[in-house]
Image (tube, helix red, strand yellow):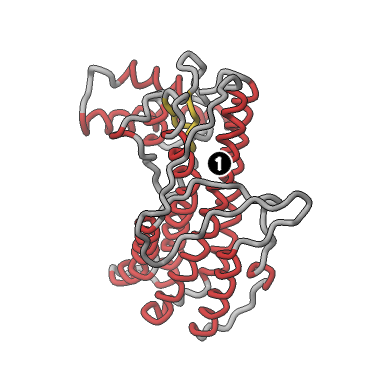
Amino acid sequence: MASTPEGRRLTEAHRQAQMDVRDEFLTEFLVLWALLDTARLDETGPGWIQAVLRAVVAYRLLSAEVATQYYWDFRAAEAPDSATRPRIPDLRDVPRETPPRPASPRREHAGRPAREPRDRRRAGRDLERAIERSGIRWDFDESALARPARRDVRIEIPDINWTRENRATEVSLNVTGPIGQKSRIGRGRPPSQARDESFVEASGAASRHVLTGGRGSLLTLLKADSQVQRWIRVTDGDPCAFCAMLAGRGPVYLTEDSAGFRAHDHCACTAEPVYHLDAPWPGRAQEFHRLWREHIFKRYSGKKAIREWERIYRQLQREQRQVEIA
């Protein structure tokens, strides 16, 4: 939670910056989507998955850089008197398995332009090879294969072993892409409809894995910072019931059993460090907290509480949208 106007500004700017990373990734994802031929899923699926995975890894790095820069800026604004720089855990000795994650970027010398990330260049080469293997003929903007780096200076990020995340990404892409289309077609969906529905699912899953870079890096930094009291979930202005519920819990996250960031496909949430427990909650978190206390707390539990929360929250969303229309 931010106790200063600058901290609140940084948190919103960080959320917007992560959405920019997601949107840039989705632009490339749209190009790569043409590689997955609905009529030849077995032949084109593996190449498509690997090409998208490379893009996910590259943009995950950008997401991590954005979150790391936010952390240091936010810390300077909220805890300016803290002279101790937290020691970031070195995870480089953790055994790695393929596909490899990118090495942490090095800060460029002043005045020297940053080099394009190696994984971005590799993603471009993979895309070209996948196009050749697929046999698909289509027109595309070649500039999408070699976009300039987003940042002039590379940010030193926590060195995290992403092996498990890479595996999860491959599984998600397979299930939402080739397998998802086959399943829908097998249930009688027209191929074009199956493809459209698969695109929505696959793009949402892939973008979630991209933003894992920022979320994972930020939480790694927070756990190493002795000045941090907790962290709180930050949503956009109109989150889903699940995210609103978690944000309404307030600054309760940092213990061993709650250290992970629960995110769903298409999720736009981020985390905000808490250096002062008496600071205002970000966004609509207090509103969600009051809603839970008024309608759910000590009335429902377990799955019944979740179902009732979803009912009440969706009713609130409908009422707010009617007011906006009026």
Q: Secondary structure at mark 1?
A: helix
Query: Where does residue 49 sit, x and y in percent of width and height?
Result: 43, 69
Rendering quarter of residue 162: bottom left
Residue shown at the point (65%, 62%) measured from the top left: 116
Is 282 rendered above or below residue 37? Answer: above
Query: Where does residue 229 sit, x and y in percent of width and height?
Result: 43, 23
Is 52 rendered above or below residue 225? Answer: below
Is 270 rendered above or below residue 55? Answer: above
Residue furthest to the right in view is 111
Of 184 and 167, the residue lying toward us: 167
Left or right position of 86 against 183:
right
Rendering quarter of residue 150: bottom right
Label 1, on which residue? 68
Residue shown at the point (47%, 40%) measured from the top left: 88
Query: Where does residue 307 sit, x and y in percent of width and height?
Result: 27, 33
Residue shown at the point (21%, 26%) measured from the top left: 301
Left or right position of 263 against 121:
left
Amino acid identity at mark 1: Thr
Quarter of the image that includes the C terminus: top right
